[in-house]
Amino acid sequence: PRRVTTHVLSEMKMKGEKIAMLTAYDYSLAHIVDRAGVDVILVGDSASNVMAGWETTLPITLDQMIYHGASVVRAVERSLVVVDLPFGSYQGNSKEALTSSIRIMKETAADAVKIEGGSEVIESVQRILSAGIPVMGHLGLTPQSIHKFGTYAVRARQEEEANKLIEDAHLLQEAGCFAIVLEKIPADLAGRVAQELHIPIIGIGAGNQVDGQVLVIHDMLGINQEFSPRFLRRYHNLYAEITGAVGNYIDDVKSVDFPNEREQY
Ligand code: KIV
Ligand code: NA
């Protein structure tokens, strides 16, 4: 199968073919997700939550994102791989944004970076793009700003914030971003952005009038149980499955059923 490029994603939007995106943070899961045929793999800074157990995405470092990114890229044959720029690696400093992005591209061999925000980070976006590095935008509920928002509630319900989001989306497109993630905003607003823009709009908690969807793999597989927003559809209950398997292993060890004669030398 041919590799997914930013050009392929733009063709998919033109044809009305939806884009399926999932996160991955390690070699083994990325291998499964890639071979299953997902279009885009996001090495999200949600690794801070699901891999490292932090409450927010703020603590994860650029070095840690690079470790996750390189692990994912080594597994991937087809999907486009996007790596999140973590908190503190780009805000308020376009030179640092470029340096961080170059490190990601060189040390992980990923295809693109993702950056949270609109007008506040547009100089960084332009500078990264000027180095030939593809940039994916991220608007709406941008978790690196959780301390500013004070809540993980739906964003842009009010007209003022909705108008700024639409302006930001246009800014990012004009700067040259190849796609934008819209997180946790009203479906009609997301649909309007997808209609006005020619670049693909990927939603998470943003309804189905957009060009594609993204979920955190640990959430959709039910590996973690704590997180259950309305927008999450669980495709498996891996927490229960793994608990069962581990329980069986413990029982077999305790009862000396494992290992048997065929499982020894
Ligand atoms: O880090 C992440 O997983 C993300 C997606 C939720 C879009 O940014
Ligand atoms: Na993220």
Image: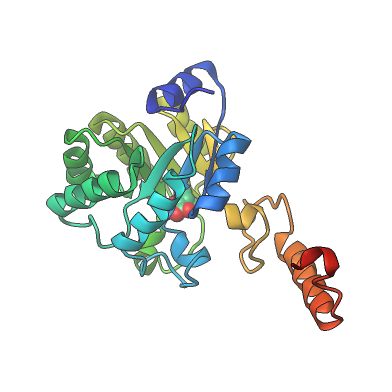
**Residue at screen point 57% across, 51% down:** 29
- Residue 108, image x, y percentages: 33, 47
Determine the image quadrant of residue 125. Answer: top left
In this view, the residue in front, 140 or 242, is 242
- Residue 126, image x, y percentages: 19, 38
Quadrant location, the C terminus: bottom right
| Residue, far left | 95
| Residue, far top | 15
| Residue, far bottom | 254
Q: Which colour scheme is used?
A: rainbow
In this view, the residue in front, 16 or 185, is 16
Would residue 83 be found to the left or right of residue 253 on screen? left
Q: Total of numbered circles in the picture? A: 0
- Residue 145, image x, y percentages: 35, 62
**Residue at screen point 47% across, 17% down:** 14
- Residue 206, image x, y percentages: 54, 43
Quadrant location, the N terminus: top right
**Residue at screen point 45% across, 19% down:** 11
Q: In this view, does 51 lie above or below 27?
A: below
In this view, the residue in front, 109 or 13, is 109
Q: Is residue 141 in sight in this rendering?
A: no
Would residue 63 be found to the left or right of residue 209 on screen? left
Would residue 163 be found to the left or right of residue 51 on screen? left
Q: Is residue 257 in sight in this rendering?
A: yes
